[in-house]
Image (spheres, helix red, strand yellow):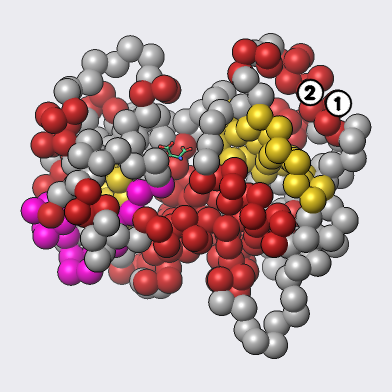
Amino acid sequence: MSPRLRHLTTLENLPRETIERLLDRANRCATPAPTAPAQADVLAGRTVLNLFFEPSTRTRTSFELAARRLGADVVNFDIGLSSTSKGEELFDTLHTLEAMHLDAIIVRHKQSGTPDELVRHAMSGVSVINAGDGNHAHPTQGLLDALTIRQHRPDFENLTVVICGDISHSRVARSDINAFTALGMKEIRLCAPPELMPGTNEVPQGRRFDDFDAAIEGADAVLMLRLQKERMASIELPDEAAYFARYGLDRRRLALAAKGCLVMHPGPINRGIEIASDVADGAQSRILEQVGNGVFVRMAVLNEVLAR
Ligand code: ASP
């Protein structure tokens, strides 16, 4: 059996067995067996801190609900980035909070690598969970995306997925690619404008496309990404109408995918920029299922790192 995780900062190099264990546990949270023991006190007496240096609605709420459903106490700590721009200040914050006897820190930070830095500096006994760092990783999103696909199509070895949009700045894309690769996905296609496609030195996996019509042909799932302007330095983007015409998901394009293709998006959605409203709200959309699965995946992760 793969060892139990103490921290979760990335899905990169996690064994398939560990990912499957987390997904199985998340599924059990989603559909508890009538005879299963109550979950409500699994983390009783544990304290979880949401330490968010970047705004978040879905992820923070979802971690909070997950922790509470398992009986943990939750403290929310939102900090403006400016007050912790220097490394020392970040670690001062960390040690101050640790002195209050925390069991887990859930961190979101604009700078890639911050959760791993916290792991290196954290006192023993404190678990660190990454809730998104720069364009590096968003491991619970990768897990919830894999869970959502698996609930509809467990046969990953037969599946082709397309990830389309601003892949360069997307931590979601990176964690999705890690999860899908570990689970043996048949084909991962990446579709982005050339200036928003990471080099193969950065993201070695995936078959690259510039033409979305070609990329989506026959796909079993399509994952759309937001233009993450806040992470861009000074990239010239086409205007939004031109972007939608080339890289947006509308009904005509979705018809090129395999029948029943799953439509996914990590949110927040920009309707009419990367996805048409009728597709986002349409019968093939799994976007709200993703949100629901986020709570179950986060329960599974908290259970993994914190349960006694
Ligand atoms: N919510 C996701 C993230 O934090 C995706 C996005 O912001 O576009 O990376």
* Disc 1/disc 2 C-alpha distance (Å): 5 Å
Residue beneath the point at 38% across and 14% down = 233
Image-quarter location of ligand 1: top left
Q: In the image, is residue 261 part of the stretch drawn in magenta?
A: yes
Q: Residue pushed farthest bottom?
A: 35
Q: In the image, is residue 206 part of the stretch drawn in magenta?
A: no
Find residue 190 and report its image quarter. Answer: top left
Q: Residue 171 carries which label?
A: none
Residue 60: x and y, percent? Answer: 59, 43
Residue 99: x and y, percent? Answer: 91, 32
Residue beneath the point at 81% across and 67% down = 41
In the image, is residue 243 above or below residue 27?
Answer: above
User: Residue tagged by mark 2?
Assistant: 93
Residue beneath the point at 47% across and 55% down = 291
Is the CB of mark 1 within 8 Å of ligand 1? no
CB under 8 Å between callouts 1 and 2? yes
| Horizontal side, residue 74 vs residue 137: left or right | right
Find residue 267 and report its image quarter. Answer: top left
Residue beneath the point at 78% across and 23% down = 93
Q: In which quarter of the image is the N terminus?
A: bottom right
Residue 32: x and y, percent? Answer: 62, 78
In the image, is residue 207 above or below residue 82?
Answer: below
Q: Which mark is residue 96?
A: 1
Find residue 191 and report its image quarter. Answer: top left
Camera sees residue 38: yes
Camera sees residue 184: no
Which amino acid, by three-letter code, is at mark 2? Answer: Thr
Query: What is the magenta range?
Result: 252-266
Which amino acid, by three-letter code, is at mark 1? Answer: Thr
| Horizontal side, residue 172 vs residue 195: left or right | right
What secondary structure characterizes most of the magenta part?
loop
Q: Residues within 10 Å of mark 1 (few under 14, many from 20)?
A: few
